[in-house]
Amino acid sequence: MRAGDRLVMDAVRRGGPWPVVLAVTAVAGAAGELALPYAAGRTVDAFTASLTDGGRQPFTSGAGGWLVACAALVACVMLCESIGVWARGASGARAAAGLRLRILRHVLGAGPVATRRFPEGELVTRAGLNAEEAGRAPETITGALALLVPTAGALVALTLIHPVLTAALAAGIVLVLLVLRAFLRTTTALAGGYQEAQGEIAARLVGALDGARTIAAAGTADREAARVLAPLEALRRHGLALWRANASAGVRAGLVVPLAEVAVLAAGGLLLASGELTVGELYAAARYAVLGSALSTGLGLIGALARARSAGARLAALLTVPRPAHGTRALPATGHGPRTRPLPADGLGPRTRARPLPADGVGAPEGTLEFRGVAADGLTVGDLVVPGGSVTAVVGRSGSGKSLLAALAARLTDPDRGTILLDGVPLPELTRDELRRAIGCAFDRPVLVGDTMGDAIALGLPAASRERPASGAVVAAAVAARADGFVRRLPQGYATPLPEAPLSGGERQRIGLARAFAQAGRVLVLDDATSSLDTVTERQVGRALTGDPAGRTRLVAAHRLSTAAGADQVVWLEGGAVRAVGTHAGLWQDPAYRAVFREAAP
């Protein structure tokens, strides 16, 4: 079974009680439909018998009883159909919600890996539209299986009436099944192409909206709109192909069904003429022929199932994105407190001089990060030590791997080979809560999550701090990030809703810094997190970083000369590897190192 089909079946199993309700109502309704022709046939026979008796007893008790039975069966079928409509909606909503929650948790847990593999618009399409289509699996599968009940029942009933009638109907049913099987295969492939085109349009649209200011400034709105909508032609082709497949299958099934019904009636007429059938039995056989051909009405269900299968395959592709596994260990209390390991007297040390720390972390300052033979995605770090309590700047030309090194240190991505340790514990062996309490991150374009400004800063903190928008930890972090002043000037201060707090790029970065300050217990990882700050604010934040009273380790991916000059240690990246590790003053003697900042200067 394909991964997409397994996901669809899992959605059915996780649909709660509603798929069961659907199945029960479908079977009960089908049983009522099966019994109705028999009851109607007996009613016809009873009235016929009374008429052949000279009409002396036109309404016998037997005929009246069968007439009541017919009415009861009609009521049962209508009730089952009504409950089924309600259950279909409930099952689809529950299945889609479960799929969305599962996809969302996986994608957010995978972190940057997911957004590198799938564009944001594609992720939105899969988690939204495709999850809804796959969520219809319970009703489509149940509905398709329910069609088998009257078909099988009709074959059994016709066999009880006369086996010749069964053979006539069975031949037609086989042809209908072949038509449906071909339709399912064709539609699944076409629906997948249709959904791919939808995802491509969404991805292009999200990218265009992200660059709306640039597009407006360049005056290329018409050209960009044409680029975004370019996949519409492919969408049209797939849509027309789906329509043609549906029409073709409908025509073929529409030809088979009347032929099967005529064959049953012709055989029944011959049997009636020979006295082997009664009029009521012939009527029942005609009705069973119609019920047995009910499979032909399943084109809509088969089409929906095909779309659910192709959507399930797209969702299953998201679930193949590797999600970091977490261990069960906690960080040790080193007992040494934060301190900076001194560098060589010349201030210059190639990366091979980084001395490995004890595996158990004993003797190392708290917050020590150690890279052992690490390489990831074209970046070779090798062996590198970030001393506990130090400020380490990561510098290099654009594309040299600064952000990747920061992501590795924060375990936002895992290395292809090698191990990264925090205070002697490999990062994958830490529990998720322990890891996120220990390491806080700030980025160049932070996304603020939460209802209020206080929520945005308290993200990741214990519940007690999150419940109070202006708790001590939140305010202290905002003060350190130089965000407290403008936050307090907002109409409701820290309780101001985020949509009512328009922020500049620099203010947004300061909120992101405050969030990192509030969360980080041992290590702060800053990925160009001060790029939008003005010079004065950057100096103030820089002083807060270098003079952090908590003594946390600070790893800063830097572009500015001032950041590198104020660091205790500089890691210089070049050509996809660590070229050297040392102090800024020591590395400054190298003309190639100075060239890095000349190229970065505006």
Image (cartoon, rainbow, N blue to C red):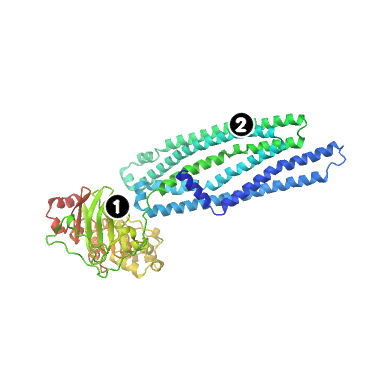
Element at label 2: helix
Give the amino acid at mark 2: Val
Residue 151 appearing in the image: yes
- Give the x, y percent position of residue 130: 46, 46
Give the amino acid at mark 1: Pro
- The answer to whether residue 467 is left or right of residue 534 is right
Residue 86 appearing in the image: no
> Would you name the residue on which mark 1 appears?
415
Q: Is residue 115 above or below residue 196?
A: below
Q: In this view, does 174 lie above or below 579?
A: above
Element at label 1: loop
- The answer to whether residue 224 is left or right of residue 18 is left
> Would you name the residue on which mark 2 appears?
256
**Which of the 4 quarters of the picture holds residue 334?**
bottom left
- Give the x, y percent position of residue 425: 30, 61
Residue ID at (71%, 43%): 36
Q: In the image shown, does 69 or 524 lie closer to the viewer?
A: 69
Q: In the image shown, does 455 or 67 lie closer to the viewer?
A: 67
**Which of the 4 quarters of the picture holds residue 357?**
bottom left
- Give the x, y percent position of residue 485: 31, 66
Residue ID at (17%, 51%): 598
Label 2 vs label 1, nearer the camera: 1
